Amino acid sequence: MIYLVTGGSGFIGSHVIERLLRNGHSVINVDNFDDFYSYQIKIKNTLESIDTISDFEFSDKETDIRQLISITHSDRYSLYWQDIRDKSGLENIFRNHPIDMVIHLAALAGVRPSIERPLEYEEVNVRGTMNLWELCKDFNVKKFICASSSSVYGNNEKVPFSETDNVDNPISPYAATKKCGEVLGHVYHSLYQIDMIQLRFFTVYGPRQRPDLAIHKFANLISEGLEIPFYGDGNTARDYTYVDDIIDGIIKSVLYLESHTGIYEILNLGENQVITLSEMVKTIEDALGMTARKKILPMQPGDVTKTNADITKAKALIGYQPDTDFQNGIKKFVEWFLRKRH
């Protein structure tokens, strides 16, 4: 099978590509190496994902990415430095490869930045995704996995969150763009028979996690003896999901799509284990053997108070079975974090 993976040099995408290649498939990685965080991190992710050990010498962004494209190209792997907002650039990729399925993970991420840059989030997360669906229609690609988000639930009072819950009340532009993706995805499924699974990820963490996300950010700050931003009273809670469990859910969704037709489904991928902010910090402290210095701050606009995934449907439909509890997941993350620093 030939898979086009958008955002394939990012946190989740690089793990997906690693698994697909290990399973004997071919992969086209489309990533724009956005400046949201260091492109150098994405280069390292890319090299790890294709199991390439390289004494990569960094110079400037364009030179480095061109070098990366050159050294990673193989019969089963192609990397394109491509923004999904550029439909003509994407069209060249679709024209040059017989794509069996799109796994769409690229997005502008983050609740708080979306409040500051809502129009850019619409351009990437809505228009960029529609460009992909238009090309799937034009090039007869009938299988599509799309990354949604637990943020679509907003401050849902019913827990755990179920796929049948009303999600008409998002509280950030980021969440709204993900809800738009689900709604528009159904349009393309209905009009053009594109089989599709929308995956609502619940707070993914683990090796290669973006450095701006809480667990990685806190580990960095605590290890350096610096203050961590601690929003609210510590009772906000998240359903943290270890990256290996997310990858398992994505791959099982891929297999389900390959063997079924007439499919449009929305699935929660979480651990179904809720951890408060205070518990999260304590677990990182224990794993590092250090104590956090907390800077107490008010709750931030757009932040939800709690997430909790009902994963009954994912278990029944695709056989999803997460098996990494938070304590073990943080232990694995910290082991990777400490190796990376040395």
Image (cartoon, rainbow, N blue to C red):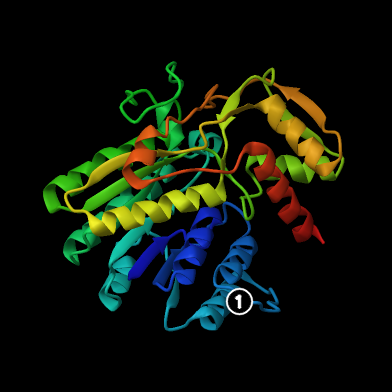
Question: Would you place residue 270 above or below residue 276 in this image?
Answer: below
Task: Give the residue drawn at x 64%, y 37%.
Answer: 326
Question: Would you place residue 81 above or below residue 213 in this image?
Answer: below
Question: Would you place residue 58 above or below residue 252 in this image?
Answer: below
Task: Give the residue drawn at x 50%, y 44%.
Answer: 109
Measuring from the top left, give residue 176's x and y in whole percent: 38, 33
For the residue carrying disc 1, how many other residues have a C-alpha within 10 Å: few (<14), some (14-19), or many (20+)?
A: few
Measuring from the top left, give residue 51's x and y in whole percent: 59, 73
The quadrant of the image that shows the C terminus is bottom right
Residue identifier under label 1:
52
Q: The residue under label 1 is which amino acid type?
A: Thr
Task: Give the residue drawn at x 72%, y 55%.
Answer: 336
Judged left or right of residue 322, residue 259 is: left
User: Which quarter of the figure has residue 83?
Assistant: bottom left
User: Which quarter of the figure has residue 257?
Assistant: bottom left
Task: Give the residue drawn at x 34%, y 31%.
Answer: 163
What SS does tag 1 mark?
A: loop
Judged left or right of residue 131, residue 328 is: right
Give the camera-side residue of 197 and 182: 197
Judged left or right of residue 141, residue 217 is: right
Measuring from the top left, give residue 137's x and y in whole percent: 18, 59
Q: Is residue 128 visible?
A: no
Judged left or right of residue 233, residue 192 is: left
Q: Is residue 116 visible?
A: yes
Measuring from the top left, give residue 167's x and y in whole percent: 34, 26
